Amino acid sequence: MAEHETSANSDRWHLLTSASCGVNKISDTHHLQSLNMSYALVWLKRDLRWHDHEAFTQASKQGPIRCIYVIEPEMWLQPDAALQHFEFICESLQDLDEHLRSQGGQVEIHHGDMVTVLSAIWRDAPFIGMFSHEETGNGWTYSRDLKVADWCQHEGVPWHEFRQFGVVRGLKNRDLLQRKWERHMHMPQSNVEKLRFWRPAGLGSLTIHAPAHLKHNPPQRQLGGRKLALKTLHSFLHARSIGYRGGISSPLSAPDACSRLSAYLTYGCISMREVVQQTRDQLAQLPPQAARQRAGLTGFLSRLHWHCHFIQKLEIEPAIQWRNMHLGYDGLREQDFNVEYFEALKNARTGWPMVDACVVMLRETGWLNFRMRAMLVSVAAYPLWLHWRQVGDWLATQFLDYEPGIHWSQMQMQSGTTGINTTRVYNPIKQAQDHDPHGYFVKRWLPRMRHVPPAWIFQPWLIPLETAISSDKDIEIVPPVVDLATAMRDSKQRLHQRRQIPKVKGGKKEVIERHASRQKFNPNFKPLRQQNEDKQQLGFDF
Ligand SMILES: Cc1cc2nc3c(=O)[nH]c(=O)nc-3n(C[C@H](O)[C@H](O)[C@H](O)COP(=O)(O)OP(=O)(O)OC[C@H]3O[C@@H](n4cnc5c(N)ncnc54)[C@H](O)[C@@H]3O)c2cc1C
């Protein structure tokens, strides 16, 4: 498949490297210092912390640092942007700023296009070099980074980027990913005892206004900042992880049982290495009788691997934000997008109580556990037969922890367009019976279900008319948007037919080569104990 070859060649490292090949190395900075460049510029992106921050550490070796965050209006116009992301970033910046001020520094907030801001800073007070973390972001941040690299090359400004996670830029051989991940997580956390700062003269204060068009800030979402990230990690490692194994699938127990670290990892309020090392320390200290918690923390650690494993897919192939990972699935759903079904889903009016309750919880809190996210996407992709692109943009704005690499890979995986994963079609009625047998979750998030008698809680449309009428309470029955059994059967058939096409079968090998986990095939890799919940999330069927 010729187009596949093109996509494999268009990995972001390739483009970034060629754009920045003229950029100076750290060792080239002496001549710049002699030109009276007296500080190193730290560009904060999605790394809003002060501890284990390689950009701070390396920049401070060069001289005093100046720390900027740039609010880029165009970034916030992208369809995956939401007010909750903006607010979470502001909270995290405030926390970071407080910390830096206690050391005599601050976070400078700038507003505008990154290259324009950089040019102005450079013109007013040239710097030794720019320091930041690598970002595997959406298509917009990727092309912004290319422009920044161009600018750096043109001006002769060294731009030093450091690894943020266990994601490897320019990875030539995916077999090495596991080893490189381990090496990164084993390295000591970087910390500078006392940072020295450079402050421009005449810095005024800036009131930050959220872009007016941005919508969606769930009233019950988690708040940003490193202090809260540490508190969340502590309560998970020392108490809540007891409920992890067995507690993460039901939306009733998951909010407590899961670590709830995702948004803090997405915005870098805490480093992945810090989380991995603290988890391993805690595991080592557990007494032998703490088997349940040990199982929980082991399962948690394997998800931290997956975090990077999934982001690596977008790092290798940025186009998976827009197009099918396996091109053989092109044209499968594109022409059938039913706007009414999509509206029903977004407005919690599909009629399936578990689905609608999840949409409301997400709207109110910005978070859902993995299984319920997978169920939402599966319902969108199969019975409603909606393409993952539009659904993915909507969900990106709903998830506080929106991490493009995980998000788009999961959107495709749950929609069956990777071509390499087990097709998992979640039945929303069965999910409700398994994970909310008494209907507590559904009643909590869907007021219209509160007075539906238990016998009809999973399928309220079956309630006899006379029962509904005779009830003295308000009962609103939303009929299912499609007949579930028929729609599921038809959609599975359509997917199955596509899978049987020889060209589609043949294209699978290439996707495996590029994106699949090598854990099964690497003789040196010692797999973590694969438990049931793990298998439900990964489990490649090749
Ligand atoms: C359609 C879909 C979209 C998703 N989008 C995102 C997203 O944008 N951002 C995001 O962080 N997670 C995403 N996930 C994965 C998962 O649902 C969340 O990471 C998890 O629910 C976050 O809660 P937690 O931190 O308490 O998770 P925990 O279970 O405590 O896991 C700890 C960490 O491991 C990582 N992780 C957990 N599960 C997965 C997984 N299946 N794949 C990759 N990494 C994982 C996350 O970084 C998470 O914070 C998505 C899942 C689906 C099905």
Image: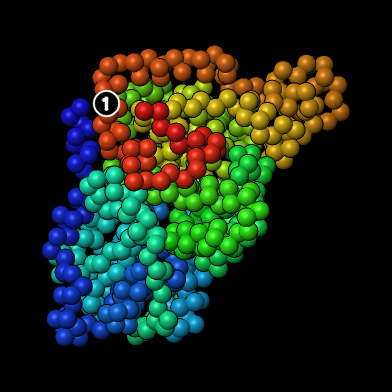
Residue 397 horizontal side relative to residue 242, left or right: left
Q: In the image, is residue 183 above or below residue 375?
A: below
- In the orientation shown, which residue stands out farthest toward the front? 288
- Residue 134 lies, in percent from the top left, at 32, 59
The C terminus: image quadrant: top left
Q: In the image, is residue 313 above or below residue 481?
A: below
Q: Residue at x 33, y 60 (%)?
A: 163
Q: Residue at label 1?
A: 507
Res. 34 in view: yes
The part of the image, by quadrant, that contains residue 353 is top right
- Residue 447 lies, in percent from the top left, at 73, 37
Q: Residue at x 86, y 28 (%)?
A: 472
The part of the image, by quadrant, that contains residue 188 is bottom left
Q: Residue at x 52, y 59 (%)?
A: 279
The N terminus: image quadrant: top left
Q: How is the image coloured?
A: rainbow
Q: What amino acid does circle 1 point to?
A: Gly
- Residue 18 lies, in percent from the top left, at 15, 54
Res. 77 in view: no
Q: Residue at x 49, y 77 (%)?
A: 99
Q: In the image, is residue 438 above or below residue 103?
A: above
Residue 446 horizontal side relative to residue 489, left or right: right
- Residue 304 lies, in percent from the top left, at 46, 51
Residue 353 horizontal side relative to residue 414, left or right: right
Within-10-Å neighbours for mark 1: few <14, some 14–19, many 20+? some
